[in-house]
Image (cartoon, rainbow, N blue to C red):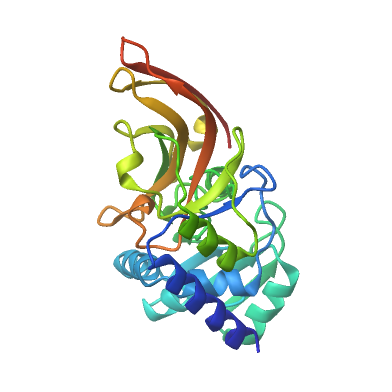
Amino acid sequence: AAAVSGRASARRFWKLSRKGFPLLMPMQSSPGHLRASYSSDFLYTLYSDKVRMAAFQGAIARHGAKQVLEVGCGPWTPLVDMALASGAERVVAIEAGLEHAEQARRKVDARRVTVLAGRSADVELPGDFVPELIVGELLGYLASEEGAPAIFADLQRRYGAVKVVPKAACSLVVPTRPLHLSLRDKVRNWAAHGIWPSLVPGQLYDIRNFPLSAQLAEAQVWEEFDFESPDLKDRLQQRHELWFSIEPGAEVGGLLFWMCTDVDDHVRLDTRDGSTSWNQYYLHLHRQRIGPDGSLLVHTSVDA
């Protein structure tokens, strides 16, 4: 039943995404809130993301590790399956959601896979298990949103220098013109989400298909993490001053945020291009005109 529901949810997601109009939902809480679990339907949509899954599958295969630690296996365990298909002899999978962990245990081969329930910082690995590779699909719409930097830093501290998939990630931001939704766009959003969309200054939105034409400058990185670096723990707090060069007189109405990841040395995914199930965030702002100097300063602060 869960698989049937998940497939239906995934089909609906991809069908809506491919229509190309801006899809948005107001965020009810800060994206920095670390989630312990997601619905099976949501996780099945990630499982159905062909671009994302192919990137992880290729990276895991290129490592060819025999002992693999997976963090956040979910109920569908796609990365566990990839590791086994790539020659892993033993996989230990950690899943914070108790129900998802139990579903995963029923799915995997217990002779080769051990599923541990709990957060990675709280569980102990089997004494005879030494990970050669850590894998985890822990990246949200932002690089630090789901706690990946802190989780990987803790695992590196506990188990030493270990290769990681994904290898690195960063988040970018760009000023935009005010987002305009036509009446047709609003009706489509209402049909998709059951909520009539309204754009409120100061409100953060989960968004997809944000128009490229609204971008006012070159995007800049405001957080970046190398998950294999021994200094990762020292990069969990970051501050940046970002100066954007924008045509004088242009009207700024928002900031768009998204994530890029180096899955390994061979594959980089930019979630802005819309080919994956990762969305972006749009912060709607009070409109302001760019002065004659053509510059806009954005301060960012990260506590990952």
Camera-side residue of 5 and 150 = 5
Find residue 68 and report its horizontal and vertical position in percent.
48, 67
Q: Which residue is at a point 54% across and 75% down the rendered structure image?
A: 44
Q: Which residue is at a point 39% across and 26% down the rendered structure image?
A: 251
> Which quarter of the picture shows residue 51?
bottom left
Residue 243 visible (yes or no)? yes
Furthest residue in direction right, as rendered: 98
Furthest residue in direction front, as rendered: 183
Find residue 250 and report its horizontal and vertical position in percent.
34, 24
> Quarter holding the C terminus?
top right
Furthest residue in direction top, as rendered: 293
Vertical position of residue 234 compared to residue 107: above or below: above
Vertical position of residue 200 compared to residue 108: above or below: above
Find residue 39 and report its horizontal and vertical position in percent.
66, 69
Furthest residue in direction left, as rendered: 266
Camera-side residue of 186 and 54 = 186
Q: From the viewer's perspective, is 157 left or right of 67?
A: right
Q: How many marks?
A: 0
Vertical position of residue 194 compared to residue 257: above or below: below
> Quarter holding the N terminus?
bottom right
Camera-side residue of 131 and 148 = 148
Q: From the viewer's perspective, is 65 left or right of 284?
A: left
Residue 241 visible (yes or no)? no
